[in-house]
């Protein structure tokens, strides 16, 4: 059952609020009574949920929004290549990495209380470059000394993203075998609603240090203490 809204209202800045996860997270946070500001490119203002404040800027350039973070206590960075795959390795380094570098630098300089980042389950097969970039960002977060929540899903089910359900029986079988149980859990499927609920709870319960949430915690919408 979803956690009731927190009485402590958060002021959340979302980079990537027009994307698959960002729009849903922004809407969920607004429903829970939080204030949400969305960093958008010019012309994208209409793609964020009603109730969001919008700021026009370049998510790859911290200077375009660094001075606007003073009214926020939480920064959620969701900028990245959509539908990541092995063929998009160059885009990961052209978009995912510099956007995260900009967000980490801006959060550090603005003394943001809580940084939220979606990484990826690792180690994992095939997606070597994607995992390397996301792991590099995790190290940047730690080096910056930020209090952060890092979520590590593998694949997020949602509208237009249901094909992995075809292999769900295989996940179940692998999860019952001792030799593959850990991998099956670490690389399990999570739903969009599970991810959004976990992120909303994370916003409401910022950690001290870096909190890592793997697939089992995301599925349970349970904020573990692993760091």
Image: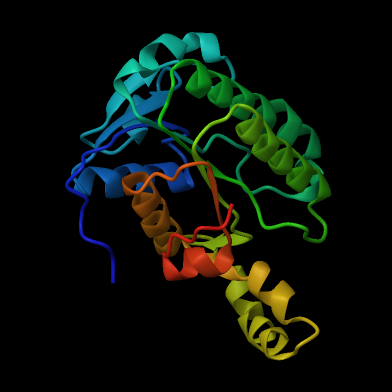
Which residue is nearer to you in this view: 172 or 86?
172
- Along the horizontal axis of the image, is 135 left or right of 59? right
| Relative height, residue 120 to residue 92 (above, below) | below
Location of the N terminus by quadrant is bottom left
Q: Residue at x 41, y 9 (%)?
A: 67
Q: Quadrant location of residue 81?
A: top right
* Image coordinates for residue 172, horizontal then vertical, percent: 64, 86
Q: Residue at x 47, y 47 (%)?
A: 20
* Image coordinates for residue 91, horizontal then vertical, percent: 73, 33
Q: Is residue 162 visible?
A: no
Q: Residue at x 56, y 57 (%)?
A: 226
Q: How is the image coloured?
A: rainbow
| Relative height, residue 177 to residue 20 (above, below) | below
Q: Residue at x 41, y 51 (%)?
A: 199
Which residue is nearer to you in this view: 24 or 139?
139
* Image coordinates for residue 29, horizontal then vertical, percent: 28, 45
| Relative height, residue 178 to residue 79 (above, below) | below
Please tell me how many numbered marks the rendered image carries.
0
- Along the horizontal axis of the image, is 30 left or right of 184? left
Q: Is residue 27 visible?
A: yes
* Image coordinates for residue 61, horizontal then vertical, percent: 57, 14
Residue farthest front in this picture: 208
């Amino acid at each position: 059952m979803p956690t009731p809204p927190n009485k402590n209202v958060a002021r959340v800045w979302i980079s990537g609020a027009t994307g698959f996860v960002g729009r849903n997270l922004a809407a969920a946070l607004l429903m829970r009574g939080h204030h949400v500001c969305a960093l958008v490119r010019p012309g994208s203002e209409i793609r964020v949920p009603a109730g969001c404040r919008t700021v026009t800027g370049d998510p790859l350039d911290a200077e375009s929004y660094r001075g606007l973070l003073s009214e926020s206590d939480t920064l959620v960075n969701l900028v990245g290549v959509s539908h990541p795959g092995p063929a998009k390795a160059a885009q990961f380094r052209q978009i995912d990495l510099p956007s995260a570098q900009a967000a980490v630098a801006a959060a550090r300089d603005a003394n943001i209380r809580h940084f939220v980042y979606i990484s990826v389950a690792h180690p994992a097969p095939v997606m070597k470059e994607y995992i390397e970039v996301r792991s590099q960002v995790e190290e940047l977060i730690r080096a910056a000394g930020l209090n952060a929540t890092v979520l590590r899903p593998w694949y997020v089910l949602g509208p237009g993203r249901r094909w992995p359900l075809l292999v769900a029986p295989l996940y179940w079988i692998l999860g019952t075998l001792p030799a593959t149980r850990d991998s099956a859990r670490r690389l399990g499927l999570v739903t969009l609603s599970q991810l959004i609920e976990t992120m909303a709870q994370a916003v409401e319960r910022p950690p001290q240090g870096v909190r890592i949430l793997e697939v089992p915690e995301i599925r349970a919408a349970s904020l573990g203490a692993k760091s």
